[in-house]
Amino acid sequence: MSRKKVAFICVHNSCRSQIAEALGKRFASGVFDSYSAGTETKPRINPDAVRLMKKLYNIDMELTQYSKTVDEIPDADIVISMGCEVGCPYIGREFDENWGLPDPTGKSDEAFIEVIGSIEKNIMRLKNSIK
């Protein structure tokens, strides 16, 4: 049986979805393949997200990830919205889950760390539900 493809989607693909892709690759690569995308892109991944992921997990998202749109990733088996606070991305189908995470962009490190921790918990839950 082939591994599931999981897509983490938010509007700009620059922060929460990028973190989810990185943590999915770190903690669940034996169970599913992780992708992230947005309905729009930003020129680069959020620098605070990049800095904190390096500090907390020693993951350099800028080495292997970039902001991309939904049409640039493979068709996913599971599609997860990171949250619709900024705007709900439309990708032509319903989301399998909405994690409802606030966008930490422009907020404190503590706000980022809280969102990163929530993403890690959700990744582990998803990993265990797919096994």
Image (cartoon, rainbow, N blue to C red):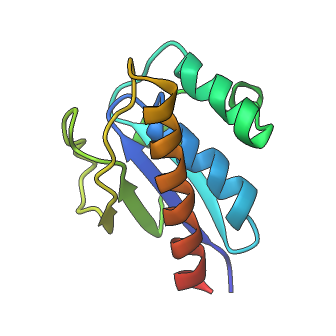
Q: Is 118 placed left or right of 47 in the picture?
A: left
Q: Which is more toward the observer, 116 or 7? A: 116
Which residue is depicted at the point 66% across and 23% down? 51
Residue 84: quarter of image: top left
Identify the residue at the far front of this view.
110
Asked whether residue 59 is in view, the answer is: yes
Q: How many marks?
A: 0
Identify the residue at the far top of this view.
43
Q: Position of residue 67 (x, y in %)?
A: 52, 27
Q: Is residue 117 above or below residue 60?
A: below
Q: Is 93 placed left or right of 53 in the picture?
A: left
Q: Position of residue 55 (x, y in %)?
A: 74, 31
Q: Position of residue 41 (x, y in %)?
A: 42, 23
Question: Is the C terminus in the top left, top right, bottom left or bottom right quadrant?
Answer: bottom right
Q: Is residue 4 above or below residue 20?
A: below
Residue 79: quarter of image: bottom left
Which residue is depicted at the point 53% across and 63% down? 121
Question: Is the N terminus in the top left, top right, bottom left or bottom right quadrant?
Answer: bottom right
Q: Which is more toward the observer, 94 or 71? A: 94
Asked whether residue 71 is in view, the answer is: no
Q: Which is more toward the observer, 109 or 100? A: 109
Which residue is depicted at the point 46% across and 51% down? 8
Q: Is 80 placed left or right of 2 in the picture?
A: left
Q: Is residue 32 above or below residue 38?
A: below
Q: Which is more toward the observer, 37 or 27? A: 27
